[in-house]
Amino acid sequence: MRVDGKLMRTIWPTGRGTVGIIDQTRLPFEFAEAELKSPDDAAHMIKSMLVRGAPLIGATAAYGVALAVSADPSDASLNRAIDALARTRPTATNLRWALQRCDREIRQLKPAARAEAAWQLAALICEEDVAINRAIGRHGLELIRAGNKPDRPVNVLTHCNAGWLATVDFGTALAPVYAAHDSGIAVHVWVDETRPRNQGASLTAWELAKHGVPHTIIVDNVGGHLMQHGMVDLCIVGTDRTTATGDVANKIGTYLKALAARDNNVPFYVALPSPSIDWNLTNGIAGIPIEQRDASEVTRMTGRTSEGRIETICLSPEGSPAANYAFDVTPARLVTALITERGICPASRDGLRSLFPEHV
Amino acid sequence: MRVDGKLMRTIWPTGRGTVGIIDQTRLPFEFAEAELKSPDDAAHMIKSMLVRGAPLIGATAAYGVALAVSADPSDASLNRAIDALARTRPTATNLRWALQRCDREIRQLKPAARAEAAWQLAALICEEDVAINRAIGRHGLELIRAGNKPDRPVNVLTHCNAGWLATVDFGTALAPVYAAHDSGIAVHVWVDETRPRNQGASLTAWELAKHGVPHTIIVDNVGGHLMQHGMVDLCIVGTDRTTATGDVANKIGTYLKALAARDNNVPFYVALPSPSIDWNLTNGIAGIPIEQRDASEVTRMTGRTSEGRIETICLSPEGSPAANYAFDVTPARLVTALITERGICPASRDGLRSLFPEHV
């Protein structure tokens, strides 16, 4: 997507044997690029969330493997990189999916052929992600078009960031929004701030503003009130892992919005690339591991002072403990439909089977 | 309640014709008192939330009237003060209830008798609030006792601050928690941070810590996940206005927790002093005015830097608009029961009638 006129993706090979990314921890205050030179860099940047979003994590991991086998194409090097990258974040499936694919395709090659193949594979995973998200946008556009009113914009509520910053390009949940906006449909996005890391207020608001899509930031508490008063036409969120039965693990708080949508007859859609489907799982609440992150993400917050300095402040009394669960699971029964690259389907085993017969 | 050993209330006449309060905008970082010398001070401190919480707003307004008629006991002065105080905050009923009571009882007196009567009335409203909250604590204690397990504490989730800082003393939602803790029941509180003003992370955590009640701060997004995993035994929240049919207006986001409680069979209780009941309203969603506050409460946050400086930071991109709805309405159907000073009743007209037959 465009950043101040320049067409960009979130990750790119630099041509010097390294990989460029956007340091997303510095947005929305500073647009800075960073460089991955080793698989350790890739693991660190995933864990520290310089890159985040399930599809982008998968792409970054693939480049991490390429960096590893470029430096040392041995089995030991491949194993070390895959193990380290797999341990970075537990919830997103795309990470394991990308690493398993790298493992399968690279290990069978002679060491001398591995580096080139790994770079090609990482690039292919990126291209596939872009194509998937374009298709999600095309399918989801029809849902937004269906909510179109002559007298006011279609109001979409989203949680966290499942925009182009969460993917290689275009985004998942926001792909339909961009497609609608670009085809002339008046659309307005309610942006959940998404505590504790504020990916909504910092990343979603930033990328919508850069693209010129009207939006309003709200705290995570507000969505229910808006839906009670007819101010949301549809919800679209992303997912970090989807079970074969349509349960959805996404950023903490997604479940609460799905409950409010159901209570107010607002359609609740989940946009997902098929690599985020965990075909082995059938019970999301019992089966999907939920990452717990550091309590300081809850008790501290970083932003810009009126003098332009980036400062971290503490919000709570000294010594009051905090807990930080990063994801929750929305049961399939609360999901109106899944928007995938192959089309829209019910959030159920039958629904997924209809689009992905080779898997179920 | 106790603050570092000293027994305190949230509001008190100083004996010098002024009124002392705790400046709650400076908690949890600094414990500072402030002084009301005029009805304008009272209106300003309610509007700027130096005092907040429906019962404390009512008590502060009563002292505002006392300050007004002490300076000038005329009808014009009484009218001016009541009008100004009534305009400060739209949602809480206690404010209008206290002002109507002052109006009724003071206006009928000769001007010379008004000042003394107004001070006595304000003190009486405070004493009644304390007695009400003690009774709410006693009734609610039985609900916590019922959730008592031999092997682990009773886990209570609360939203915003309905503790002693929101009242004259003891609190509403937290009164049962303090009663349980003080009677030896092991209790642990999940404290919703409560964006955008963070009354949970700043006020509820502070007062629970001061009293020694185990607690954990969570972002507002987390409660649904905790309930899905059996980590919440009951929810107790306060209310700023309750309809005659049991609908409840409380801090924005309360409705989302009530939905999660219902979805997971967790009891959802609302603690309320009867002055917060609006006997004229039967449809909370249509009838209760929801305050909209400044967008800067969403886009900016204040806290303490590592050097101990209090600093305000901006969280969102320049120019991204924000909306700030301060309350939402939880329909009676989602409320397990109301905890009042007269006992516990279903959230319904019949339930309220059984306890308050003189009103319905």
Image (tube, coloured by chain):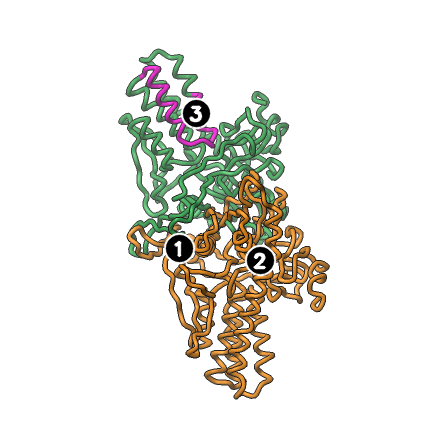
Chain colours: A green, B orange
Any mark on residue B300, and which?
Answer: 1
Q: Position of residue A298 (x, y in %)?
A: 42, 46
Task: Identify the mark nearer the N-term, 1 or 2.
Answer: 2
Amino acid carrying mark 2 in the image = Gly
Residue drawn at (52%, 74%), measured in percent from left and top? B123
Above or below for A41 versus B20: above
**Quadrant where the C terminus of chain A lies?**
top right
Residue drawn at (55%, 39%), measured in percent from left and top? B151
Instruction: Please identify the residue farthest to the top as the structure is shown.
Output: A110
Q: Residues within 10 Å of mark 3 (few under 14, many from 20)?
A: many
Task: Please provide the residue range marked out in magenta.
Answer: A73-101
Q: Nearer the viewer, residue B198 or A39?
A: B198
Residue bearing the label numbered 3: A98
Q: Position of residue B275 (x, y in %)?
A: 60, 66
Q: Is residue B319 left or right of residue B287?
A: left
Helix, strand or loop for disc 1? strand
Q: Nearer the viewer, residue A344 or B331?
A: B331
Question: Mark 3 — on which chain does it sit?
Answer: A
Residue bearing the label numbered 2: B137
Discs 1 and 3 share one subunit:
no
**Quadrant where the N terminus of chain A lies?**
top left
